[in-house]
């Protein structure tokens, strides 16, 4: 429906293409994998009929001894960022799903090249460079980048690259690979009238 509307009102025309672009390949690090495969648990249902913990039992704004946010209990995906310190949980995910989740964290396409099948429980904690201790939105940081994109550590703590290697036994390697992209062929700036 949206495609039809955009095509009709803005004369939008697009096509898919493949372009050679910088990507990260997710691979197993030298020391080997440090995560365990996901084991399906059959949790008893709560009185509400859900197998997830009640929302009022979830910690809000709590931090652990290393000053990372404490995630609420349960086996659902969760991300909390407090003062540039990130705790991220992705339970029961495949390596391809985890790689897709990393795209939002590293702002570049990530391709699963581990060759590992099955599902895993992923838990990761890292510090966003330039945001630790500032109490501001880390994505709005005006501070210049001081490390290379794949640095393991910087003055604020472990980067996401370092956390991947030390906590999960995974690594992101910079490569060039074909990536599917959506190319806009034409679009009018002013829509047609109703």
Image (cartoon, grey):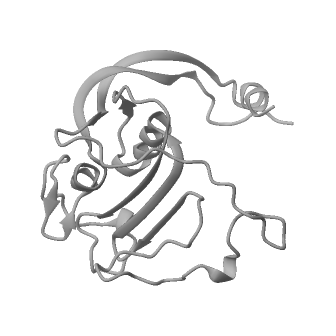
Q: Position of residue 139 (x, y in %)?
A: 37, 62
Q: Position of residue 25 (x, y in %)?
A: 30, 31
Q: Position of residue 12 (x, y in %)?
A: 65, 25
* Residue nearer the viewer, 110 or 171: 171
Q: How many marks?
A: 0
* Residue nearer the viewer, 78 or 118: 118
Q: Quadrant of the N terminus?
A: top right
Among the 4 quarters of the image, the one containing residue 116: top left
Among the 4 quarters of the image, the one containing residue 26: top left
* Residue nearer the viewer, 165 or 178: 165
Q: Is residue 102 above or below residue 13?
A: below
Instruction: Residue at 31% x, 25% y: name it.
Output: 21
Instruction: Residue at 48% x, 83% y: name it.
Output: 61
* Residue nearer the viewer, 73 or 142: 73
Q: Is residue 113 above or below residue 41?
A: above
Among the 4 quarters of the image, the one containing residue 45: bottom right
Instruction: Residue at 46% x, 45% y: name it.
Output: 101
Q: Quadrant of the C terminus?
A: top right
Q: Is residue 186 left or right of residue 173?
A: right
Q: Is residue 122 above or below residue 135?
A: above
Q: Position of residue 9 (x, y in %)?
A: 76, 31
């Amino acid at each position: 429906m949206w495609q039809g509307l955009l095509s009709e009102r803005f004369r939008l025309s697009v096509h898919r293409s493949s372009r050679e672009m910088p990507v990260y390949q997710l691979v197993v690090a030298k020391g080997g994998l440090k995560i365990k495969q996901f084991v399906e648990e059959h949790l008893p249902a709560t009185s509400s009929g859900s197998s997830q913990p009640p929302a009022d039992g979830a910690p809000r704004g709590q931090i652990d001894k290393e000053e990372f946010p404490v995630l609420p209990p349960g086996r659902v995906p969760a991300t909390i960022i407090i003062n540039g310190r990130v705790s991220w949980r992705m339970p029961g995910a495949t390596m391809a799903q985890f790689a897709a989740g990393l795209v939002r964290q590293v702002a570049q396409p990530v391709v699963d090249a581990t060759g590992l099948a099955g599902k895993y429980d992923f838990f990761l904690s890292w510090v966003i460079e330039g945001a630790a201790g500032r109490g501001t939105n880390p994505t709005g940081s005006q501070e210049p980048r001081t490390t290379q994109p794949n640095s393991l550590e910087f003055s604020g703590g472990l980067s996401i690259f370092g956390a991947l290697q030390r906590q999960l036994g995974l690594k992101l390697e910079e490569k060039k690979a074909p990536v599917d992209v959506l190319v806009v062929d034409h679009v009018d700036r002013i829509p047609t009238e109703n």
